[in-house]
């Protein structure tokens, strides 16, 4: 690790799923659950869950670009959620669960467009992942941070999150910490 980090902000359903996977990814140095994309400052989980704030549940990743590229971050992203379902991941329904990439720079936007084009050939249905410039980000409540690690046997974690983590481990064994 060279000491320099970059940021990625991604939404792909419940933030617990993305968080659990990226916590295991080599080169990702920090993962935080939060909210972005809406107009309300400092929203709460309860407010975001209504779907009225415009915010998406997201993860904010700090990563070492010398260890993992932004392209690889996005490739993992498209593997662990369904980018073809609008405002939905499984039983999680609403705009807060949308598939979205919040790019931090022109270069990230360029890479994201390239990865979306590459993934269009992988999925049978059209990709509906939104691409948007970074917006005000708000850290989610503490009880959402490292949620799966704290509650591995909770039903949602065991039935929904764990299979995504296993998919990541199987497909990206070379990327697991």
Image (spheres, rainbow, N blue to C red):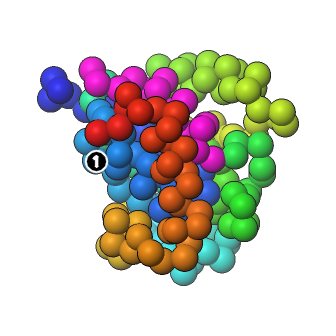
The magenta stretch spans residue 72: yes
Q: Residue drawn at (43%, 54%), measured in percent from left and top?
A: 19
Q: Position of residue 49 (x, y in %)?
A: 61, 74
* Residue 126 can be seen, yes or no: yes
Give above or below for 110 relative to 64: above
Q: Position of residue 84 (x, y in %)?
A: 77, 43
Give above or below for 100 relative to 113: below
Residue farthest to the front, as pictured? 170
**Left or right: where does residue 146 sit relative to residue 18?**
left
Mark 1 surroundings within 10 Å by alpha-carbon count, few (fewer than 14), some (14 through 19), many (20 or more): some
**Left or right: where does residue 46 sit relative to residue 169?**
right
Give above or below for 109 relative to 153: above
Determine which residue is flagged by label 1: 30
The magenta stretch spans residue 137: no
Q: Nearer the viewer, residue 45 or 125?
A: 125
Range covered by the magenta-colored residues: 66-81
Number of residue marks: 1
Q: Residue drawn at (54%, 44%), measured in percent from left and top?
A: 167
**Left or right: where does residue 82 sit relative to residue 79?**
right
Q: Residue drawn at (35%, 49%), measured in percent from left and top?
A: 23
Magenta span: helix, strand or loop, mainly? helix
- In what quadrant of the picture does the C terminus appear? top left
Q: Residue drawn at (41%, 33%), measured in percent from left and top?
A: 173
- In what quadrant of the picture does the N terminus appear? top left
SS at badge 1: strand
Q: Nearer the viewer, residue 81 or 166?
A: 166
* Residue 140 can be seen, yes or no: no
Q: Position of residue 76 (x, y in %)?
A: 52, 35
Q: Nearer the viewer, residue 128 or 153?
A: 153
Residue farthest to the left, as pictured? 3
């Amino acid at each position: 690790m060279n000491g320099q980090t970059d940021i990625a902000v991604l939404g792909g359903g419940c933030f617990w799923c993305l968080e659990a996977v990226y916590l295991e990814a080599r080169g990702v140095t920090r993962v935080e659950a939060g909210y972005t994309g809406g107009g309300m400052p400092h929203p709460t989980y309860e407010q975001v869950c209504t779907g009225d704030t415009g915010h998406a549940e997201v993860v904010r990743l700090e990563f070492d670009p010398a260890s993992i590229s932004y392209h690889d971050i996005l490739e993992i992203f498209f593997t662990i959620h369904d980018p073809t379902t609008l405002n939905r991941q499984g039983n999680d329904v609403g705009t807060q669960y949308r598939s979205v990439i919040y790019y931090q720079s022109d270069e990230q936007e360029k890479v994201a467009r390239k990865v979306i084009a590459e993934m269009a050939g992988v999925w049978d249905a059209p990709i509906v992942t939104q691409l948007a410039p970074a917006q005000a980000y708000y850290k989610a409540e503490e009880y959402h941070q490292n949620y799966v690690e704290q509650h591995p046997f909770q039903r949602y974690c065991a039935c929904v999150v764990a299979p995504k983590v296993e998919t990541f481990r199987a497909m990206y064994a070379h990327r697991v910490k």
